[in-house]
Image (cartoon, rainbow, N blue to C red):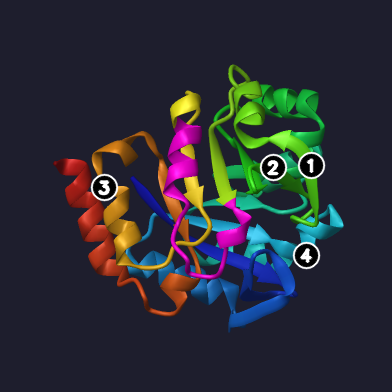
Amino acid sequence: MILYPAIDLKDGVCVRLEKGDMSTATVYGVDPAAQAKSFQDQGFEWLHVVDLNGAFAGASINGAAVEAILRATSSRIQLGGGIRSLAQIEHWLIKGLARVILGTAAVRHPLFLREACRLFPDKIIVGLDARNGRVAVEGWAETSRFNAIELALSFEGMGVAAIIYTDIDRDGILSGVNWDATLELAQQVSIPVIASGGFASFEDVERMIMPDAAILNGAISGRALYDGRIDAEAALILLRKGIQS
């Protein structure tokens, strides 16, 4: 079970949003590379990085900050936000990313997703960001007609490495993860599922090691780690013990 610290990039700095609203950005650090190194020093082996500007623009905007993160840490990094072509995927994988996250491109262009999974096996994650069960795209600015579970089922057999399921209405507001919806999705698909949105306290860490959550790959935490609501060392110790038991 993996706890992924989130580094969300807006205009070159680390921020957290509330429910994906760019106007609510709270700056948590002006040096993303230093933040990445800090998470690595705390013991995190994975980092979850999102180019927020890129998600809206449909192209890499915070590329310089991402490259600085890659130089500063040996942690495995998954990146999302504005990656919508095979050339962009290849570019970032060559730079050293462990995995690339496709959101809008995966939802709107399933043939593109299939080709990306074929060319880059075990490197492609799909981000399913849902509002009231419906998948949102374009940096969460638009809600599509697609049901999250139905769309996730359509990815079966493509070679998708994981699905990140985010409850938009909980993201960044410390209300707790929507475990029920996340587990329902995970029970329906064979693709590993990562919980995202609302991670709030050590109770969410404890929830990760409950027996029914064993089907998940892990969960993403942002604001709760930055605010000190979760002690990183204690969380990682508990997760390791949970795996061993």
- Magenta region: 167-186
Q: Earlier in the sequence, mark 1 or mark 2?
A: 2
Hey, what amino acid is under mark 3? Ile
Q: Closer to us: mark 3 or mark 2?
A: 2
Q: Is residue 217 left or right of residue 32?
A: left
- Contact flag, marks 1 and 2 (Cβ < 8 Å): yes
The residue tagged 4 is 53
Q: Closer to us: mark 3 or mark 4?
A: 3
What residue appears at the point 64 percent right and 27 percent down from the top-left corner? Answer: 150
The residue tagged 3 is 209
Q: Position of residue 141 (x, y in %)?
A: 80, 57
Q: Earlier in the sequence, mark 4 or mark 2?
A: 4
The residue tagged 2 is 134
Q: Quadrant of the C terminus?
A: top left
Residue positioned most to the front: 132
- Contact flag, marks 4 and 2 (Cβ < 8 Å): no
Q: Position of residue 12 (x, y in %)?
A: 71, 74
Between 80 and 185, the residue placed more toward the observer is 185
Hey, what amino acid is under mark 4? Asn
- Contact flag, marks 3 and 4 (Cβ < 8 Å): no
Using a 10 Å C-alpha cutoff, classify the residue at mark 2 as few (fewer than 14 neighbours), some (14 to 19) or many (20 or more). Answer: some
> Residue 118 occupies which quadrant of the picture?
top right
Asked if one can make out residue 93 in the rendered structure from this viewpoint, the answer is no
Local secondary structure at mark 1? strand
